[in-house]
Image: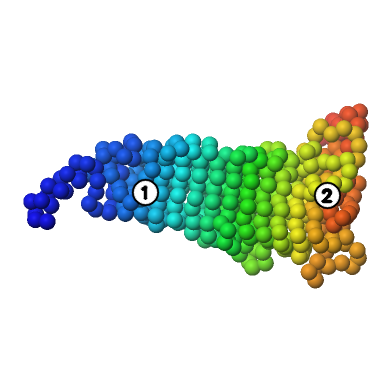
Amino acid sequence: MNMKKYALFALFASAAGFALADEFTAVSSGNWTDTSVWQDGLIPNAEGTVSFMNGIELDVTTAVTVKNTPWANHLATINITGAGASLTYTTELTMFGNTRLTINVEDGATLDSAKINWGDGGNSNIYVTNGSTLNANFDQMKGSALSRGGSELVIDNSSALMKNQWNIGCDNQSDYSLVVKVSGENAVLQGASSRQTLAFRAKSTSIAKLIMSDGAQGNIYDLNVGTGTDGGENRIIIQGAGTALAANSVNIGKNDGTEGALSVLQFGGFDESGNFEAAGAAALSNSWEVKVQDSGTILYLLGAENASLTQDKSSAIFKAQYFKSVNGIMEVDLSNIAGLAEGDYWFALLSSAQDISNSSPYTLDGVPFDWNTQLKITDTGAYTYNGWEVASNTLYISVHVPEPATYAAIFGALALAFAAYRRRK
């Protein structure tokens, strides 16, 4: 092609909004396919490396494919909206360093990336809502500084396929946070079929959480809570009617450097800010083994929906094939149970295919354990704890709920005691 023909072709391509180069920069807000949005009017192609000027907002309403977004000082919002809308990265979406991207995937849209490198720094968030889809290979997920509000990945009545081994946490940072929230009866968190691991690795004063609620469903392979961390808060919360998470194996407080770390598998209870939301433990099942190390805790925040008048193994909150070792603590809080009539109720905390009868002396996988010391009832509220029992390899606790008149007497006595205390002061 001679120079005159090449110049005419370049002019035609530019006028048509297509690029000859492979680097593209969005310089103003608007629809992704508008030439006015992009520097020199060049709309990114499938081989494009895409960057964003600070403060812009882009709307994706059709199918768009690019190569990657590099590590840069981005500050932008991308809205992918509608059943026919998708944004596909064939190589990598990078949210690292001082990158501050907010990506909204809404109303049946799709975000698909060969890899998402969600490194430490920045303040990036991804929200997948109302029947949308996230399909990504997560290289890492480290969140951002608490002073910037931390980072969130939200899956609300939508689905997420998380491929490869992915780590949630901030293992190289202090005062960082990454919270993954999966909520709604149509929400699905699905690990790839390969043997990937979901590991929570918050270090120092950082926070890493997975919150599943309101009927969400999850299915992953290995689940490690507090793996290889010193300090930090690593917590999984499963709450709300119908919510369920399945895993192959579960390891809470893994023994490689967990000194000072908070490693908690929590059934029911609190929101990501630590505010009391609603008790009512939902279910976790696993097909192989469970290990609760010295630094790990299983915390049950029970609600009335977890109560049964009979010993019912099918209602067990934590269903496991084998409890290989339990040297951590199982803690039960009864303070939020409400609405039950007078009577004695059973709560099935866990069931196993293995004998957990705790005949003395007893070991699990060669490790001594004792439900009398490792099962702790921390707050009974207005109820009476009757004790624990193992039947059909299921661990139950029994709780007595008094009649309403007894409630009144209890609270009246407390009020009198408080008044007397005030007078002494």
For the residues labelled 2 and 1, say whether their Cβ atoms are less than 8 Å apart: no
Out of 15 and 201, give the one closest to the viewer.
Answer: 15
CA neighbours of label 2 inside 10 A, class few (<14), some (14 to 19), many (20+): many
Residue 149 position within the rendered picture, expressed as x and y whole percent measured from the top left: 51, 44
Q: Residue at x 9, y 56 (%)?
A: 2
> Which residue carries the number 2 mark?
313
Amino acid marked by disc 1: Thr
Number of residue marks: 2
The quadrant of the image that shows the N terminus is bottom left
Out of 346 and 11, give the one closest to the viewer.
Answer: 11
Residue 356 appears in the picture as rendered: yes
- Taking 130 as reference, is 342 left or right? right
Q: Residue at x 67, y 50 (%)?
A: 245
Provide the secondary structure element on which disc 1 rests.
Answer: strand
Residue 21 position within the rendered picture, expressed as x and y whole percent measured from the top left: 24, 53
The quadrant of the image that shows the C terminus is top right
How far apart marks 2 and 1 lie (CA) works out to 50 Å
Residue 235 position within the rendered picture, expressed as x and y whole percent measured from the top left: 65, 52
The structure's colour scheme is rainbow
Amino acid marked by disc 2: Lys
> Which residue carries the number 1 mark?
65
Provide the secondary structure element on which disc 2 rests.
Answer: helix
Tell me which numbered mark, 2 or 1, is placed earlier along the sequence: 1
- Taking 130 as reference, is 91 left or right? left
